[in-house]
Amino acid sequence: MSGVITPLPPVSLVLGGARSGKSRYAEALVDRHPGRRTYLATAEVLDDEMAARVKTHRERRDSDWRTVEEPLDLAGALKAETEQGAAVLVDCLTLWLGNLLGQARDVEAEIAGLVAALGQFGGPVVFVSNEVGQGIVPDNALARRFRDLAGILHQRLAEKADHVVFVTAGLPMKLK
Amino acid sequence: MSGVITPLPPVSLVLGGARSGKSRYAEALVDRHPGRRTYLATAEVLDDEMAARVKTHRERRDSDWRTVEEPLDLAGALKAETEQGAAVLVDCLTLWLGNLLGQARDVEAEIAGLVAALGQFGGPVVFVSNEVGQGIVPDNALARRFRDLAGILHQRLAEKADHVVFVTAGLPMKLK
Amino acid sequence: MSGVITPLPPVSLVLGGARSGKSRYAEALVDRHPGRRTYLATAEVLDDEMAARVKTHRERRDSDWRTVEEPLDLAGALKAETEQGAAVLVDCLTLWLGNLLGQARDVEAEIAGLVAALGQFGGPVVFVSNEVGQGIVPDNALARRFRDLAGILHQRLAEKADHVVFVTAGLPMKLK
């Protein structure tokens, strides 16, 4: 985040492992946006562990941020939120994939829909997502399918994104 | 892959997580080779999931590629295939390790044999392998042994390789 | 490790997956230190697998190294060992976290204590730690808590460290 502050590009993708500091990095990125900012949470708050995480994230952002929860229709929510030029932080895509799988949606079609919508937003979007494919192959087929879908989504988005970073221990590596 | 097209170096290693785009990157690398190209598949096609993966990979390559399947004797197949100067893409080393473990081979000796053979090939070789050691320590001893062997193999090959990249979301980071 | 040999900075953090070559890299770093060197092992040698690992690490270091085992009180051991200007290699932090969890300690408080102690050492310290957060979300809550704590520790240390690298296949990427 050092150096000259430049305007946010249309599409950024921030990848990283669990507790890598990727959300914090993405928030700092969106904080550079001079206009309205929206935190688009894909989490469905179903248990205490999740509630604690959302609370931590919320406390870190200042009052300039608007929070929206949308577990499924990401493209729709992004179109609505960016209409007036607001910057949107989507946190995170892997939870969105989990939600789609939980609803037995056609996930490949949903991914294609999101990628197709990338040119149609009225403000900059920063996507946060978990790297989940660098451990041992999971035992169960659903987990394998989940990490395959995550990898496919990351490739598709990275191809279209203007800015891609991988965050480790809070430190960004620029991939694009 | 940008910039001036230079000849393939003798040994390249392309690492990445699941669905990271590592095979696609490696294919683009080998496509720069002006002569014959061989896709050396280490997969034993045992189920529908694997068959679908192999089919996807095959459709991506054009008709200039020859496909060879060799689950165990990698060094031998590489010597034979590179004899006429062909470039060979080995996809992938982690499957090869799994095959050796499944056959109760002396895997350390097999790794040493492959590394020793690196100077004896008649054409450039590009190895693709999965990063599997960046998740939680697996519960079972076989999975721990597998990821230890993968890490050891990657270190040994990277030491000898001319070109090593790590692919994330389709984007390469140069390690060497 | 190429180029001009410069003095070790006060705090270095070497991250990497299983069998990534991170310990070897860290040892080469500490070997640049002209004075006494200590290998601070956090491992409690409880089984044959662990004993074999410790033996391998020990054989790799020459006789100039002193070995100390400290599973819990890292800050205390580091103060004592660096008193005379010795360089200390801590191998590794994820085992330390595991030890603290096993003793039902207040791990967040222990992390804060270690980070607070960073300015109080009399010699350079090189921390080695495992990246464990880039696989599929673990099934059980303890493993999830473990990887959350590892991520938090890595972020806190990386923020204070002078030098942070991520090692893959024996090859370092500089993060800071």
Image (cartoon, coloured by chain):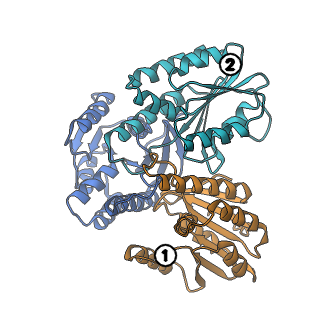
Chain colours: A orange, B cyan, C blue
The residue type indicated by label 2 comes to Gly
Label 2, residues with CA under 10 Å away: few <14, some 14-19, many ≥20: many
Q: Which residue is mark 1?
A: A57
Looking at this view, is C176 or C32 the one in front?
Answer: C176
Name the residue at 47% across, 18% down: B113
Residue A154 in view here: yes
Residue A131 in view here: no
Name the residue at 44% across, 52% down: A140
Instruction: Say the numbered circle drawn on residue B123.
Output: 2
- Residue B95 position, x and y percent, is 51, 34
Looking at this view, is A111 or B83 the one in front?
Answer: A111
Q: Nearer the viewer, mark 2 or mark 1?
A: 2
Label 1, residues with CA under 10 Å away: few <14, some 14-19, many ≥20: some
- Residue B153 position, x and y percent, is 47, 30
Left/right placement of residue A45 relative to residue B10 reads left
**Circle 1 chain:** A
Total of numbered circles in the picture? 2
Instruction: Say the numbered circle drawn on residue C95.
Output: none
